[in-house]
Image (spheres, rainbow, N blue to C red):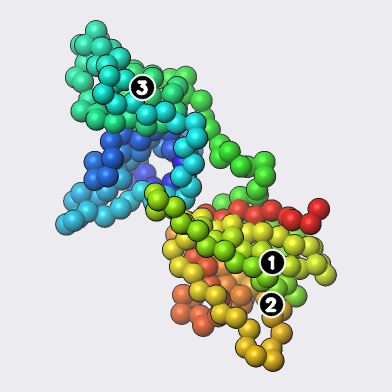
């Protein structure tokens, strides 16, 4: 599971693998890693200070293949740990996450009580995204510049296929395949946590070639458009994709 959330420490946006989720819905909280502070944080899914709430943890990927669920009798060990150590039992109905996190009861009590825990205090293994060997993630401006140099700024490329998906957990993604065989080859871009999607086909009797494009990354995520612009312009009349995360891979090696 991969999300974008707001840090409790500096209130900045950060993207992180989820290590555990406590409870569900309105009451859900997520254990994430703050790479700048080298600490784990417990962040609320909803900002409850806003009438009717406001989502502040946004889903990018929802893969939970290695997660385990703890509820009912499976939470008795946590209760027993708190009793033996004279700690207040956290009001946890459901716990869902990596076993080394969910079964480290000292860590759970610490982060629930204090919201922030230094990463070196407990033997919690830091995780990376499971597909980092298959995909190149674009997270920084340097990543953007490297890709745009390889793909020649999308010059003479064409968008040959677009697919949109969403799952039961609210995660959305767009896979877009671009052919730039004259310069670099064929690449697949995967936009995850899609917030805006507009694809404008070429007009009749017009070529489908893209002459230039915009790829921009900032705190709001990733912006792509099929025309060059200095800054992202959501009013642009051509094709636009805005998402929380972007990764790419070459298809024709």
Left or right relative to 43: residue 231: right
* Label 2 SS: loop
C-beta proximity under 8 Å, tags 3 and 2: no
Measuring from the top left, give residue 207's x and y in whole percent: 71, 85
Visible residue check, residue 37 = no
* Label 3 SS: helix
Sequence-first tag of 2 and 1: 1
Q: Which residue is mark 3?
A: 107
* Closer-to-camera residue (39/65): 65
- The answer to which image quadrant residue 10 occupies is top left
Visible residue check, residue 18 = yes
> Which marked residue is nearer to the observer: mark 1 or mark 3?
1
> Which marked residue is nearer to the observer: mark 3 or mark 2?
2
Measuring from the top left, give residue 132's x and y in whole percent: 63, 42
Which residue: 66% across, 59% down?
188
162 versus 43 height, above or below: below
Sequence-first tag of 1 and 3: 3
Left or right relative to 155: residue 125: left
Residue sticking out furthest to the bottom: 205
Sequence-first tag of 3 and 2: 3
Q: Which residue is mark 2?
A: 210
Left or right relative to 232: residue 25: left
Left or right relative to 108: residue 199: right
> Which marked residue is nearer to the observer: mark 2 or mark 1?
1
C-beta proximity under 8 Å, tags 2 and 1: yes
Which residue: 19% across, 19% down?
88
Q: Which residue is mark 1?
A: 178
Which residue: 43% across, 38% down?
18
Measuring from the top left, give residue 58's x and y in whole percent: 39, 51
How far apart, in angstroms, are the residues tagged by discs 2 and 1? 10 Å
59 versus 28 height, above or below: below
1 versus 234 height, above or below: above
């Amino acid at each position: 599971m991969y999300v974008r959330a707001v840090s409790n420490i500096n209130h900045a946006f950060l993207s992180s693998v989820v290590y555990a989720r406590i409870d569900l819905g309105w009451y859900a909280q997520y254990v994430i890693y703050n790479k700048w502070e080298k600490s784990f944080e417990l962040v609320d899914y909803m900002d409850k200070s806003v009438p009717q709430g406001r989502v502040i943890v946004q889903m990018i990927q929802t893969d939970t293949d290695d997660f385990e669920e703890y509820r009912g009798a499976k939470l008795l060990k946590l209760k027993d740990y708190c009793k033996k150590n004279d700690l207040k039992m956290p009001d946890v109905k459901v716990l869902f996450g990596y076993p080394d996190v969910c079964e480290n009861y000292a860590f759970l009590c610490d982060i629930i009580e204090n919201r922030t825990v230094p990463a070196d205090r407990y033997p919690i293994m830091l995780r990376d995204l499971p597909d980092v060997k298959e995909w190149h993630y674009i997270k920084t401006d340097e990543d953007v510049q490297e890709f745009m140099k390889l793909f020649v700024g999308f010059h003479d490329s064409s968008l040959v296929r677009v697919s949109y998906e969403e799952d039961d957990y609210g995660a959305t993604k767009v896979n877009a395949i671009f052919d730039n065989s004259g310069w670099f080859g064929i690449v697949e871009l995967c936009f995850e946590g899609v917030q805006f999607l507009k694809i404008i086909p070429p007009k009749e009797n017009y070529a489908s070639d893209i002459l230039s494009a915009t790829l921009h990354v900032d705190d709001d995520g990733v912006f792509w458009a099929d025309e060059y612009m200095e800054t992202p312009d959501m009013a642009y009349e051509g094709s636009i994709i805005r998402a929380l995360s972007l990764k790419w891979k070459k298809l024709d090696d």
